[in-house]
Image (cartoon, rainbow, N blue to C red):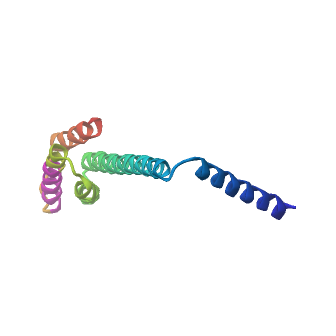
Amino acid sequence: MLKLLGLLVVLSGVFALGYYTGQRSVGELKDTIVDLSRNVHSVLNTTLGLERNLRMRESFVGAKARVIQAKSDLLERNFGNAARELREALDELEKTGSGEREGDASAKVKRLIAKVRQAQTELESGRNVGRGKLDEIQKELDSLLAS
């Protein structure tokens, strides 16, 4: 029964397509196909742009969470964990920085990566990093998330 119904739907579709092409000229059909393909490409590009933006924001949020955890570890005088959290935040930012295409945002991400790398190396070498420095990094991440 299902096969018969499926065959009937396919035959109806083929008949409708044949009838439609018989009523229209070939040039008109080509124009319709070109318009449809342009629309599909436009939708595809928009979707890819939204996905890239979402992944970028997700990386910024992950990096911000790591910076906040590093601040918490600094308050507890756990410098090893704070350095590890900053290293993971650095990985998130580098992943985001490689996907950036815009000039201004890319420059901001590169400056932020340099600041995080400096704070992380200071912690790994045993020097204390001020909480203000991590607050500044967090504020820059907030500004990148807002834009």
Q: Give the answer, above or below, for where 55 lies relative to 141.
A: below
| Magenta residue check for 118 | yes
Residue 5 visible somewhere in the drawing: yes
Q: Which residues are magenta?
A: 110-124
Residue 37 point in image, percent of width and height:
44, 52
Give the x, y percent position of residue 45.
37, 50
Quadrant of the image occupied by residue 146 = top left
Q: Residue at x 59, y 52 (%)?
A: 21
Q: Is residue 22 magenta?
A: no
Q: Residue 3: name its quadrant.
A: bottom right
Location of residue 135 with respect to 121 vertically, above or below? above
Whether residue 81 can be seen here: no
Closer-to-camera residue (45/103): 45
Frontmost residue, 62 versus 27 = 27
Left or right: residue 45 versus residue 71 is right
Residue 46 falls left or right of residue 102: right
Residue at image position (50%, 50%) is: 29
Task: Identify the image quadrant of the C terminus.
Answer: top left
Q: Position of residue 129 (x, y in %)?
A: 15, 49
x and y percentages locating residue 42 in the rendered image:
39, 47
Q: Nearer the viewer, residue 8 or 26?
A: 26
